[in-house]
Amino acid sequence: MQHKKATYSILKGTWLYYSESKDKEVSIHLSNTGMQRIYIKGALQSEKRSLKMKSEQSFSADGQTYSFKTFPSNSQLTAFDCELRINEDLVRIYKLKYNFDWKKYVVLFGGIFLITLVVILMKQPDWMLYTANGIYLVVVLAFFANKMMVIEEFDNKMEINL
């Protein structure tokens, strides 16, 4: 069965999905405030707030035990792994990574450079520089924030081709 694709939004948080059948439709919402909510078939089953780098949430529903674990996958804290287990079986792994493709940041740094250059050449006061760059950053983040995070999904399946 095809499941929904995981999404990231700077305003709405991260949504992770797993669906094996109609009986196992799991939606996980990771908000930017640290709240983790797990829905099964659209009904809220568990919620937990954690601002720690590592967190684990376990609960039982419909005769099955669910476990969701989040932890950093590198020491720079630029990537996180999330594991979903059902009845102690690892069913899905999600990798959340920050997108550090410098080509995408040319727009950001180029715009800041141009604004700074114009303000200096026009001999405007310092507050004008800070205000213009602040507005520019807000506008750029509004358009490009959803491209800052890459989410990869992996099933716990092994295939052998002979």
Image: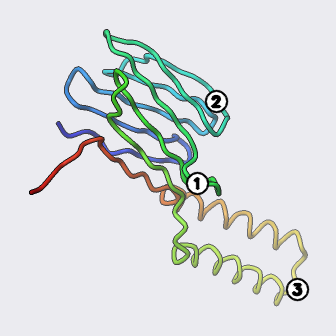
Q: Secondary structure at mark 1?
A: loop
**Which label's residue is closer to the chain start, 2 or 1?**
2
Local crowd size for mark 1, using a 10 Å CA cut-off: few (<14), some (14–19), many (≥20): few
The residue sitting at 79% across, 66% down in the picture is 131
Q: Secondary structure at mark 2?
A: loop
Amino acid at circle 2:
Ser
Spot occupied by residue 19 in the image (x, y as percentages of width and height): 26, 32
The residue sitting at 70% across, 76% down in the picture is 112
- Label 3, label 2: how far apart the Cα atoms are: 48 Å
- Residue 21 figure quarter: top left
The residue sitting at 53% across, 59% down in the picture is 148
Spot occupied by residue 1 in the image (x, y as percentages of width and height): 17, 36
Amino acid at circle 3:
Lys
> Label 1: which residue?
74
**Which label's residue is closer to the chain start, 1 or 3?**
1
Vertical order, 123 against 41 (above or below): below
Spot occupied by residue 129 in the image (x, y as percentages of width and height): 81, 73
Vertical order, 124 against 48 (above or below): below
- Label 1, label 3: how far apart the Cα atoms are: 45 Å
> Label 2: which residue?
50
Q: Residue furthest front?
A: 162
Q: Secondary structure at mark 3?
A: loop
> Label 3: which residue?
123
